[in-house]
Image (cartoon, rainbow, N blue to C red):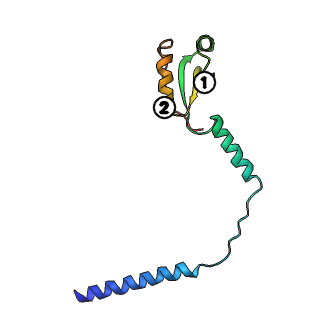
Amino acid sequence: MRILSVQNLFFAGIFILGIQYSAFSQTGQVNVQQSEMIPQLVELKSQMTKDGKLGERYQIQLYYGDNNQASEVIKEFRSKYNSWPSQIIYETPNYKVWIGNFRNRLEADRALLKIKQDFPAAFIPKPQRG
């Protein structure tokens, strides 16, 4: 039993010395070269995130079907509510009426409660990553 303890102690000592050696032996100089466009891209990404074009956003779907009916639904929505943006999205072969650009599910659920009074078929689809 004593031999195992000495062996374990020996290997632990070698392991610790190896870590200390590798930590102190890595000295040098690092040169980082980056493109001049990186600050511009970071600024563009932050602006797109702020505008809601990037990241997960929640929207409420009011309608799914043909173009004429989608136009009628969006006109009716815009006449009753003007606080949320609305748009018609085309996915072959149907049109969707989406409203809002909510940052989280709670905001979307609150808006859905108000909208359901006039549009009972409205629901919140799973958000798509931007």
**Residue 72 in the figure: left or right of residue 60:** right
Q: Residue at x 58, y 12 (%)?
A: 80
Q: Is residue 13 left or right of residue 50?
A: left
Residue 34: quarter of image: bottom right
Please state, as top left, top right, bottom left or bottom right, where the C terminus lies in the image: top right
- Please name whichever residue, 60 or 90, is drawn nearer the observer in this view of the structure: 60
Crowdedness of circle 1 by 10 Å Cα count: few (<14), some, many (20+)? few
Name the spot of residue 3 as percent of width and height, x first: 26, 89
Q: Residue at x 62, y 17 (%)?
A: 82
- Does 99 appear above or below 21? above
Nearer to the camera, 52 or 94: 52
Q: Which residue is mark 1?
A: 92
Element at label 2: helix
Residue that numbered label 2 is attached to: 105
Q: Earlier in the sequence, mark 1 or mark 2?
A: 1
- 40 to 79, vertically: above or below: below
Left or right: residue 39 versus residue 23 is right
Q: Are marks 1 and 2 in contact (CB under 8 Å)?
A: no
Query: Residue 60 at x, y = what percent?
Result: 53, 24
